Amino acid sequence: MSPIRIVKVNSKNPEYNYVQEAAEVVKNGGLVIIPTETVYGIAANMMDPQAIKRLHDIKRRPDNKPFSVHVDKKEKTEDFARAIPVAAYKLIDRFWPGPLTLILKSKNEGTVGLRMPDNEIALKVISLSGVPIVCPSANISGLPAPNNIEEALKDLSGLVDFAIDGGPASLGRESSVVDLTGHSLQVLREGAVKKEDIERTASKKFVLFICTGNSCRSVMAKYLLEKKLKEKKRTDIEVLSAGMMIASGFGATEETREVLRREGINASGHLSQRVTKEMIKKSDFILVMEKVHEERIMELAPEVKNRVFLLKEFAKIKDNNLNILDPIGRSLEFYEQTFATIKEAIERIVDII
């Protein structure tokens, strides 16, 4: 047996030289024991056939049973998976980084398991390696997964090249595994995330209103829809609003607050935010105020085409113009007219969703 190098690393503020060394070992085909929040794992370069063969042999795992890929950023999901369902983005937004593995359709063929661990050491090793990493639990298949470095080395000492001691795993339980490749979600393994929390998150609907600055039109729509949903005792829908152009942190305009106040709605706590790809991809209904907003959404995330609508399509249209014009800089009367159009649309939407 070859001697194994073991280093102790601060789990909150990992020493760069140690995680860089571990990353280099992985990159060059070595096997490294690293901590995650669930259990300790064995990191290996997914692109190195010899490393993967060695990993299968060490774990005594069949060659036809693949390992899940661990990523350091949520957006890297799209590097490995295709035809990603909206439920996946909801689960990623809610549980990543964290103890949830998603089974998705692979970019090539078949399926791929993906997880983003909630552990600074693991994330830095993944990031610094610069290669796709798999990281199954650091145990022989069928034996209990290790919660600390001592348990991990019990059966693997001399079989791996490097090990990081980052203290006990904070959860000490393996990740939950969810298959999203079929028509319906399937929880293959209930681990650290409860099945009911997974199903509740995946089934929750997200409605996203988008305007230019997120200070008037989308604010009116969001607050009004929330009021209507509350009246109907609907708790399965979350309403978001965002802008295409503005930085985050600004309040609603004075006129917006006034027209909403007349509707019995207090919007004084609103803070603007800029729309992100993550918001778009996890939303079931994306309602925009103008055609230009729709075009911009298509540039950001063309796959959501069938979920984007002009809000005015749902109002009682009296003309061929489907844009709800920006009231910024206009009179309170114009704001009231804008709100009336939005209200007509919301009255219909609340029944549709």
Image: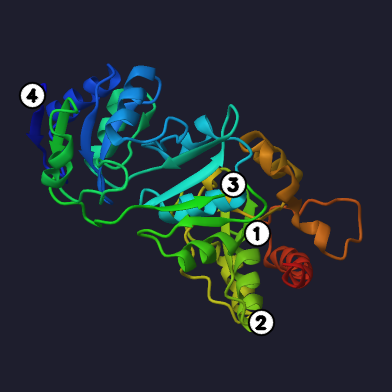
Report the Cα–Cα distance between label 1 and label 3.
21 Å
Report the Cα–Cα distance between label 3 and label 4.
47 Å
The answer to whether 76 is drawn above or below residue 85 in the figure is above
Report the Cα–Cα distance between label 2 and label 1.
23 Å
Residue 160, percent across and down?
A: 19, 28
Residue occupying image coordinates x 50% and y 52%: 178
Choose top left, top right, bottom left or bottom right for residue 28. top left
Q: Could you say which is closer to the camera, residue 292 or residue 193? A: 193
Of marks 2 and 1, the one in the foreground: 2
Q: Which residue is mark 3?
A: 281
Give amino acid for label 3.
Answer: Lys
Report the Cα–Cα distance between label 4 and label 1.
65 Å
Instruction: Using a 10 Å C-alpha cutoff, classify the residue at mark 3 as few (fewer than 14 neighbours), some (14 to 19) or many (20 or more).
Output: many
Q: Are marks 3 and 2 in contact (CB under 8 Å)?
A: no
Q: Could you say which is closer to the camera, residue 152 or residue 312? A: 152
Provide the secondary structure element on which disc 1 rests: helix
